[in-house]
Image (cartoon, grey):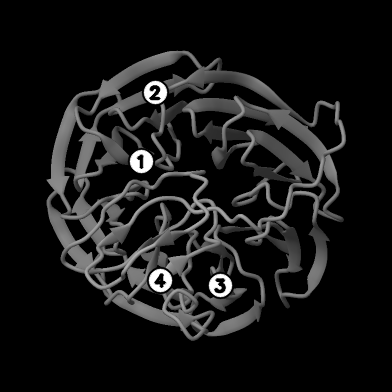
Amino acid sequence: MILRNLPRNLSVNAPSKVGLSGLCRQGLALAFLTVALTGCSTIGGWFGSSGKKKPVPLAEMKNDTVTSAWSASTGKSAGYLFVPAMADKLVYTAAHDGTVSALADEGGRLVTRIDAKSKLSGGVGAAENIVVVASNKGEVLAFDPAGRALWKSSVSGEVLAPPSVLAASVIVRTADGRLFALNRTDGKRKWVYQRPPPALTLRTNAGVLASGATIYAGYPGGKVVAIEAESGKPTWEATMSLPRGATELERVADVSGVPVLDDSRVCAAVYQGRTGCVETLNGNVLWTREISSADGVAIDGKYLYVADVEGNVHALDKTTGASVWKQEKLVSRDPGTPVIIKGKILVGDVNGLIHALSPENGELIGRATTDGSRVVSLLAYGDRVVAQTDKGSVYLLNVK
């Protein structure tokens, strides 16, 4: 089978007993890979497209809508998509070499540097008095803010997603979609949730959304699942988009980002599928739109925002799904998951730029530069945003 046109942050898992394994290599410019799926384990790597549209040239923009408060270098990602975490006025970041850095949110000063003594692939999860990361060998490692090891637990699978730290548990998602609940105090396993995987699934760093006593997670087949945080029992399952196509590759239809909670609805996007919202009470589908995305969504008081697989950024009415606007100037720049700060829509891109968009019409109203490598994550931090790049640079940004 020839695998083509996969988005920037995805590779394909083909479950089996033996075969190839690979890192989540980001930005690898392979036009195609020929592989016999029978007997393959993980088809690692990042796939580009020789027929991909060229980015639209961007006009010069000199303004102070988005400015850098500070930046720091915390170690290279080696292609893994690490996500920072914030706790106790510290910004925690991870690097593949096992370094976990704690930076002061004011000024970016290095407060603590932790040596996890393992090659890391997932992180960071943080809350009061605990920092959690994961290795590419399925080890989950917990430390206190001073860097002292608290516990280590094995989840028998590669972890790409940042662990989620709850009041009594740490939720860890492995690359094959299994969810492990570990005791926050000692790392002992409390429960495991798993679903039978399809022949092909997307390999992403999407974790889970935890809210109150419920965990929301996206799965292959266009599924969003609500799970009891204490017991691991599923509450409901919603199908946002059914797989379509004649081949297994064409039928990949996975929720590849973290679902977003908005009052009584949970919203998400499906790769090679639809974007939409379901009810939190029972999983009933409220609406869906034919927009395929390899990333997550963002929601404000009126609209839902999503970047499609081509790089167009859409605003949809969050109640009905009706189209409000579409920004086409970021095509082929891989905007990623939008973040909303001070009424502005922020997205990163493959060239290390961070763009600010107007929520009313999608107009580009601001831009900030980083180190020139891909912006792999943007996170809201109060009325500011934390960005991390593929080279391991971390930025705290002010937004006007």
- Residue sitting at 21 percent across and 38 percent down? 141
3D distance between C-alphas at marks 2 and 4: 44 Å
Q: Which residue is mark 4?
A: 1
Counting residues from the start of the chain, the first of labels 2 and 4 encountered is 4
Q: Amino acid at mark 1?
A: Gly
Q: Position of residue 366 (x, y in %)?
A: 80, 36
3D distance between C-alphas at marks 3 and 2: 38 Å
Label 4 crowd (10 A; few <14 / some 14-19 / many >=20): few
3D distance between C-alphas at marks 1 and 4: 33 Å
For residue 102, the mark is 2
Which of 203/48 is in front? Answer: 48
Q: Amino acid at mark 3?
A: Gln
- Residue sitting at 63 percent across and 26 percent down? 370
Q: Amino acid at mark 2?
A: Ala
Q: Amino acid at mark 4?
A: Met
Is 330 on the left or on the right of 196, as rendered? right
